[in-house]
Image (tube, rainbow, N blue to C red):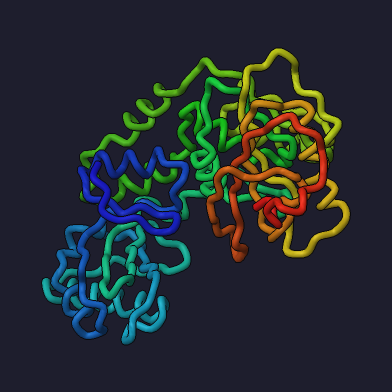
Amino acid sequence: MVGQSAGRGSVTFSASHEDGARAALALRTASRVVWTLASSFPDERDAYFGAVTELPWPSWLPPDTPWAVRAFGESETLASPLFTARWTKDAIREAFARVAREMPPVLPHDPEVVVDVRLERGAASIGLALGVESLHKRGFERRTRAPLREDIAAGIAVLAEINPAQPLLDPFCGSATLLAEAAAVALRVPPRRGDIAEAISRLPAFSEVNTNLIIEELRAQRILQHAPFFGYEADSSQLPHARRHLEFNDLEDDVRVAVGRVPDIKPPGGLPLGLLLTNPPWGRWLDHDVEAAWEGLGRFVKAELSGWRMAVLSGAEGLTRALRMKAERRFPLRIGSVDARLLIYQIRSYPDRQPSADSEPTAE
């Protein structure tokens, strides 16, 4: 597969249909995979309309199948995604009328095929999304408060350089979204994408692609031997949900979760050096409990995990000062409306002390 362009949480591609389907069925870190129909289109309204009508839509949209347009970005004359979606729909309607064909029904709120339009850097691109819903939706009903999106959690695991040969620990595992996605990335466990496979099969251009065979091939790539993966959560009411989450991802035999409160956790002895990957409590406003949790995390890792690496997600400026550690790498992230950071630390066993006067003013 040859990448063409990448956007936030999405991949557009120029490759074989089979490779495109494989990307949509395998990627845990993308929210959309788009089969590009045309790129470098004009983003001026009338010129864009004319270019869209020239495309062979009757051969791309399946008959009698409800569809919709979703647009992203804007230009001077295509000033809103809603207008661009309607303008595109009208252009496609004109393309069908030119060849005296009936256009399939438009169903914006419940389509089975989605036309994807993107305006950026002075040009437009148009394609078909391989899957109707965002790919971060795994089919698991999330009932807990403010969990990470699954694609973001998987991306965090990739940035943290997770390795199946190294132990993985999350001391604030909550409902196990981050822990489950990290383990799945490490072990090459594909997401459940039966609905995506059905959506791909509906597209005429993908009629020769055997999505069931691709799914079986992806499942066969799973890594079976790995170091221990485990998580702790202070709130015992979260653990049943965490266990269901792991079971849904076929990870119930690979990841263990238990009640435990930082900094009092005692991980199993005799483990090789590993990775602590976690999303501690944070927010735009600090309170005593939040800061205490971060202080406890700092004490715990220095006492119990010397030599390990730690990857911590923070969405509050200055919060990581409570760790009294200095990050070696920082990755800026956007979590919803919050500018967050993933910070990577090398854990050393040194005295828990306040930073000296000549040290950096912030641990971030």
Judge from the rendering whether residue 245 lies leftward or rightward of residue 36; answer left or right: right
Q: Is residue 9 above or below residue 50?
A: above
Q: Quadrant of residue 236?
A: top right
Q: Position of residue 220 (x, y in %)?
A: 40, 22
Q: Position of residue 9 (x, y in %)?
A: 45, 55
Judge from the rendering whether residue 235 lies leftward or rightward of residue 178; answer left or right: right
Q: How many marks?
A: 0
Q: Point out the image quarter for the N terminus.
A: top left
Q: Is residue 247 above or below residue 149?
A: above
Q: Position of residue 350 (x, y in %)?
A: 76, 32
Q: Which residue corresponds to the image point at 36% horizontal and 68% vertical from the top-left?
A: 69
Between residue 263 and residue 106, name the one nearer to us: 263
Q: Which residue corresponds to the image point at 61% horizontal and 25% vertical from the top-left?
A: 274
Most distant residue in the left direction: 99
Q: Position of residue 113 (x, y in %)?
A: 35, 58
Q: Which residue corresponds to the image point at 63% horizontal and 28% vertical from the top-left?
A: 168
Q: Quadrant of residue 246?
A: top right
Judge from the rendering whether residue 94 lies leftward or rightward of residue 155; answer left or right: left
Q: Which residue corresponds to the image point at 39% horizontal and 29% vertical from the top-left?
A: 218
Q: Is residue 331 above or below residue 108?
A: above
